[in-house]
Image (cartoon, helix red, strand yellow):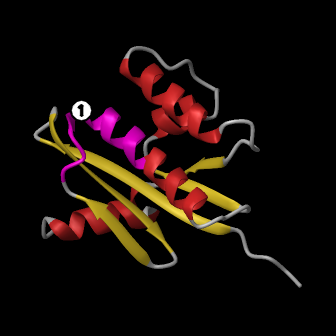
Amino acid sequence: MTRTRIKIYFDGGARPNPGTIEIAVVCGGVAHIERDAGRGGSLDAEWLALIAGLRLARARGFEDFLLLGDAAAVVAQANGVVRARGGAAVHLAAFRALVGDGPKPRIRHVGRAQNLAGIALAKLHGR
């Protein structure tokens, strides 16, 4: 039996930037959107979306999943390739706390056009 790795797409934005944060997580073709996830900048929004994606995976008991986002900086910081500073370091700490002692989740960068969560957010605004 072949298991398929579950793909979880994440994206976030702030309107204006900085402003009200909105995030989206898409899993199994279903978009989970939060239109008011607080206030902050676009980097904060991307981090909150990544954390929401990880929470969704944990809540559903997924073991083999891949988190996909178009924010290269957040993906690099979450993977430990680039050092997180300032507010990003706070988000990284929250992310790592959620990971706990479990296996490190797989996080990959995708282009904006392939990010289903970004597409879901764009549809909210008629783009």
The type of residue carrying mark 1 is Gly
Q: Position of residue 76 (x, y in %)?
A: 56, 33
Residue 7 lies in the magenta stretch: no
| 1 w.r.t. 59: above or below | below
Q: Residue at x 57, y 54 (%)?
A: 67
Residue 109, x across and y down, in percent:
55, 48
Residue with the mark numbered 1: 41
Q: Is residue 48 magenta?
A: yes
Q: Residue furthest bottom?
A: 1
Asked if residue 110 shows in the view, the reply is no
Q: Quadrant of residue 101?
A: top right
- The mark total stands at 1
Residue 30 in the image, given as x and y percentages of width and height:
41, 77
Where's the C terminus, which quadrant? bottom left
Q: Secondary structure at mark 1?
A: loop
State the quadrant of the N terminus: bottom right
Pinpoint residue 35: horizontal percent, then vertical percent: 20, 56
Q: Residue at x 16, y 32 (%)?
A: 18
Q: Is residue 38 left or right of residue 93?
A: left
Mark 1 Cα within 10 Å, few/some/many (few <14, many 20+)? some
Q: Nearer the viewer, residue 56 or 84?
A: 56
Image: magenta residue range: 36-49
Q: Is residue 33 above or below residue 90?
A: below
Q: Is residue 51 visible?
A: yes
Residue farthest toward the right in the current orientation of the protein? 1
Q: Quadrant of residue 59?
A: bottom right
